[in-house]
Image (tube, helix red, strand yellow):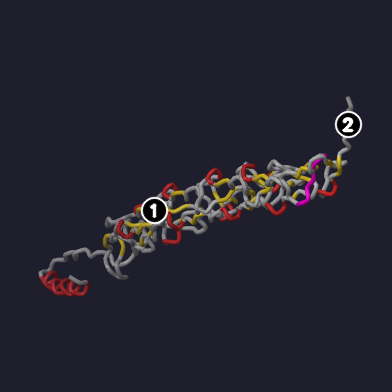
Amino acid sequence: MGIRPIFLALAAAAPSVYSQGHQASLPSLPSLAGPCAAGLGRPVPGSPCMACSAGTWSSEGPSTCQRCPAGRYNSAMGATSAEDCSPCPAGAWSSQEGAASPKACQDCPAGTWSSEEGLSGILECTRCAPGRWSNSSRASSDDACALCPAGKFGAAQGSTTSEDCIACAPGRFSDTRGAAFYTSCEACPAGRWSPEEGLASRGHCRACPAGTWNPAGGAFAEANCIPCTQGHWSSTAGATGQSVCEKGPAGRFSGLLGASSDAACKDCPAGTYQPIEAAGNESLCIPCAVGNFSTARGQTACDYCPPGFYGDSFGATECVACPPNTTTHDAGAILEEMCVGVAVTLLLP
């Protein structure tokens, strides 16, 4: 029954009361002005005090119920204090004022977390730091943010999947978990290389093979390893400088790039010699001059034809004997005409 009908009913009853010659007291009416008790409020000015609805509260004195602030809720009627408004739990938030149910609390989304209660907006959820990620909602601790693995880094905040972790480029590695910057990816050291992404340690960088060297870090292909030049060789893997390439010995040659042992060096053929080291091809084997010869391979010098012999061609492997009863005065004769008769001494009886 509204206020106006109540007054009309009382007015209709009043004449009968007084007509009997008796003075009777009127029924008491609820107070329509002034303060309300704690937990009560007037829905509209001039209305009776009524219990504050869920999601609101009132202390003693005010005539209006106050809404629970954003980030809090209250599911009971007649709340008497703001403390009766429960905070949304850690990992949740609510921007709604006067919320009457915990259902008003929304989860902090994947990639975020919060250890505080009573958040009033989604932006108050803390994003996972760079180098970390989380696919869990309503996380209440940064422990929910997993670390990017070694060999990767995460540059963005609030990542929601491990796929957001970026692999170190070929030729680089990182042994740090939870790395946040590309600079955490170190270059494979000089003398080593790697074609793979996301290396987790220096040990995964491959050594340049024997016969090669590389002075620079960060190599991403074996082709970055520089071969020892022709006439040189090296048995050392992971070399960082050209000085590791040893010279092939005199009397031998090698046309092979990147030789890994001196077995790549071949002997100069018989009839030739090679006085210098690190010969790069057979054309550097020098034919023996006329008057000289060489019967063995891998020689560093040719021998003179001995007395009684001569050599009239280049690259000889043997000398030609002088005709019978002739000889040469000196070694190294180059023509048959240099063979002269031998004086014969007759011994008489």
Residue segment shown in magenta: 307-313
When asked about the image quadrant of residue 67, the answer is: bottom left
Residue at position x 53%, y 51% from top? Answer: 179
In the image, what residue type sits under mark 1?
Answer: Gly
Q: Mark 2 Cα within 10 Å, few/some/many (few <14, many 20+)? A: few
**Secondary structure of the residue carrying numbered label 2:** loop
Q: Horizontal and vertical percent for residue 36?
A: 32, 60
Pick the front one: 269 or 221: 269
308 horizontally vs 209: left or right: right
Q: Find the distance from the CA under tag 1 to the CA under tag 2.
A: 129 Å
The numbered mark at residue 91 is 1
Q: Horizontal and vertical percent for residue 129?
A: 50, 54
Q: Find disc 2 in the rendering and name its residue.
A: 346
Q: Horizontal and vertical percent for residue 305?
A: 79, 42
Pick the front one: 291 or 124: 291
Q: Is residue 65 above or below residue 201?
A: below
